[in-house]
């Protein structure tokens, strides 16, 4: 994985977090090339339910200071997993609200293609 691929993946994460922060779930498909979990109304219900159950307001944008221990940079929360067959890599990002972990993980997949990097929105899963 090149540094350029890493930066592209981080930019996609930033774009998705911005959409989630503004609760514009219907705009998620514009952030990626493909949605494995494509029912944005179901995504809205799942996310809003989790936020409300845990007394969270909205998801944080990328780079918001965190309140949890041990304190670490958000960049470290973007976890990269390269595929052994060289076809691409997966990305996990732990979502936060108000600087606190929400116990939800954004999961994306990036596939190498002749035309460039293809991004697939897999899911937002409980940790």
Image (spheres, grey):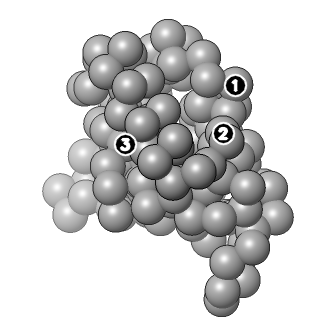
Residue furthest to the right: 65
Is 23 above or below relative to 124? above
Is label 3 in a helix, a strand or a loop?
Answer: strand
| Place of residue 11 in the rendered image (x, y in percent of width and height, measured from the top left) | 66, 39
Compared to 102, does 20 lie above or below? above
Where residue 25 appears, as percent x and y from the top left, is 51, 19
Secondary structure, mark 2, is loop
**Which secondary structure lies at badge 1?**
loop
Q: Badges 1 and 2: C-beta atoms under 8 Å apart?
A: yes
How many numbered circles are shown?
3
Q: Residues within 10 Å of mark 1 (few under 14, many from 20)?
A: few
* Residue denoted by label 2: 58
Q: Earlier in the sequence, mark 1 or mark 2?
A: 1
Q: Residue at 59% x, 51% y: name it.
A: 55
Q: Residue 109 shows which numbered tag?
A: none
Q: Are marks 3 and 2 in contact (CB under 8 Å)?
A: no
Q: Which residue is mark 3?
A: 124
Q: Name the residue: 80% across, 56% down.
A: 64
């Amino acid at each position: 994985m090149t540094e350029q691929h890493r930066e592209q993946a981080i930019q996609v994460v930033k774009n998705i977090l911005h959409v989630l922060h503004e609760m514009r779930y219907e705009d998620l498909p514009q952030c990626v090339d493909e949605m494995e979990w494509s029912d944005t109304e179901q995504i809205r219900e799942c996310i809003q339910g989790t936020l409300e159950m845990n007394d969270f307001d909205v998801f944080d944008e990328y780079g918001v200071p965190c309140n949890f221990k041990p304190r670490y940079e958000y960049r470290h929360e973007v976890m990269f997993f390269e595929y052994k067959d060289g076809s691409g890599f997966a990305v996990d990002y732990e979502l936060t609200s108000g600087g606190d972990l929400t116990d939800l993980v954004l999961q994306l997949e990036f596939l190498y293609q002749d035309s460039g990097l293809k991004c697939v929105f897999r899911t937002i899963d409980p940790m």
